[in-house]
Each structure stands twice: as structure tokens, then as C-alpha cells.
Amino acid sequence: MEYLRQAPDGKLLCTKDTKKGKTYCKWYQVPHGNHGKRMYISKENRELAEALAFKGYSAGKLKDNAVELKQIKCFMEKLNGKSAVEKYLERAPEYLSLLKSSRFTADFSGDEVSYGNLKEELREWSQAEYRSNPNHPEHLVCKTPNGGYVRSKSELFIATFLQMNHIPYRYEAELELGDEIIYPDFTIRHPKTGATVILEHFGLYDNDRYFESFLRKLRAYRRCNYIPYYNLLMTYETDDIPFDSARVSKMLEFYFLEE
């Protein structure tokens, strides 16, 4: 960004100081690379504090954009390149013929595709027992149409949409990502292909502590080849931007219902 080249030197540091029961915020200008003594910014010099604050925000946006670009490139490479399974099936039509008549379930381009009775396989999958999130069961307060419980009205909307459209899913099912165990909000199986898709709803996206947890989970997904808006869907809401049920409906229709 052009602004970063013209911005004041260093970065902004905000500290809190309590005197006589009142909390005050202090601003400091920290030299680049933390070399040198930080300089106090008086309230009369608010313009400098604002400039440094915007500089830090702009630098953070650049980092976010770089991460997103890397993910998009990874997605495009996966989308455009031919997998080993695709190359295998291209050798001769007999391969595919044998697979279609097989009682086994084959894995094609990362998407699970049942060449037998997919509908029956998905029905059994959705009804089978699984390990779910053991943390804070008291927060499961919203009852879904099939009698299950989720943690928020937004998740209730998603669960209801999936149930009403006969899209099989599991709520907060245990998922092993390398050495880490997590519990995605929704593990969904595509009703036509059997592909597994994770859907995470981040309902406190503007909360700093919650956002750090979101980043840790996103890194774990990335390490295990879960790519945003390929096999990893995400929805968000903040205090200022509420859950958009119409937009989420269109997204779910696009991924699971359209031909």
C-alpha cells in the first residue's frame, strides 16, 4: 500500500494505567524493529496516534490478503491439476466400469464417491453413533427439528436447512487433524457425491480471543488440505454484522443442491 511508505516511522503501542480507581490509556510510538526507546504520544498529538493505528491496521490487511492469495492459489492448483486417481481412470474405460459395479467405496479427487448405493451409505452414516464435543454441554440450548441440540440460533438455522433439504451431517463430530483433535461445527456429506465438507460458523468473529482460536483452527485445517470454499465452508457474524440467513441459504444451495 502507498500509505505504508508514507506513514510515520515505527508502530503504535497502547497501554493502560490505573490511578485512583480510573483507567487511562497511554499511546507510545515504538521505533521500527523495537530498536530504541519508545516515545510517549500526548493526547494533543492524537493525529500521530491515529496515523500509526491505521498503519498497523493496513499492515495487518496486507498479511491477511497474502494468506488468502496463497489459499486461492492452492485451491486453483488442486482444481486444475489432475489427481493420480483421475490419471488411473483415464487409462481405460474398463477401470471405471469395474468401479461402478463394485461393492466398495472409492475415493476420487479427495471426494468420497460411493459406486454402490450412495443413498443408503449416507443414511447409515448420518444415523451411526460418533464421538461429539464433550466441552460445555450446557451450552447446547437450541433444539433442531430432528431432536438434536446446537449452541446458537445461527447454527440452528444451518442445521434446519440441512435437515429440511435431506443433506446428511454430523454436529461437532470428532475430527483428527494430524496430532490434534477438533470438533467442527458441521461435518457434511454431499447428497449426490458423498464428498465430505466441513462447515464452521464463527459467531464471535469480532472477539479478539475468539479470533485467535479461529486462526489456530484454520491453520490446522490448512495443514490437512482443507481449503476454504472447496471442502471447508465458513460463515461469520459480529455485533455489527448479524447472521445473514439469506446469504447462507444461497451458499448452501450452491454447494449441495444445484446441479
Image: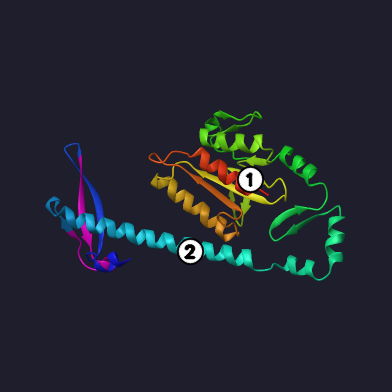
Residue 90 is left or right of residue 53, and the answer is right
Considering the numbered disc 1 on the image, is that residue within a helix, a strand or a loop?
Answer: strand
Can residue 131 be seen from the camera position used here? no
Q: Is residue 2 above or below residue 228?
A: below
Q: Is residue 91 left or right of residue 205?
A: right
Q: In the displayed structure, does residue 222 sit left or right of residue 125?
A: left
Q: Pick whichever of labels 2 and 1 is earlier in the sequence.
A: 2
- The reply to whether residue 199 is visible in this rendering is yes
Q: Residues within 10 Å of mark 2 (few under 14, many from 20)?
A: few
Percent across and percent down for residue 18 are 20, 42
Q: Nearer the viewer, mark 2 or mark 1?
A: 2
Which disc is residue 187 wearing?
1
Q: Identity of the amino acid at label 2?
A: Leu
- Image position, residue 44 (x, y; %): 12, 52
Based on the picture, tell me whether residue 30 belongs to the magenta stretch.
yes
Q: How far apart are marks 2 and 1 (CA)?
A: 25 Å
Q: Give the range drawn in magenta.
A: 23-39
Q: What residue type is labelled 1?
A: Thr
x and y percent of residue 62 in the render?
Answer: 38, 62
For the point 50% across and 65% down, the residue is: 70
Residue found at the far bottom of this picture: 91
> Residue 94: which quarter of the image?
bottom right
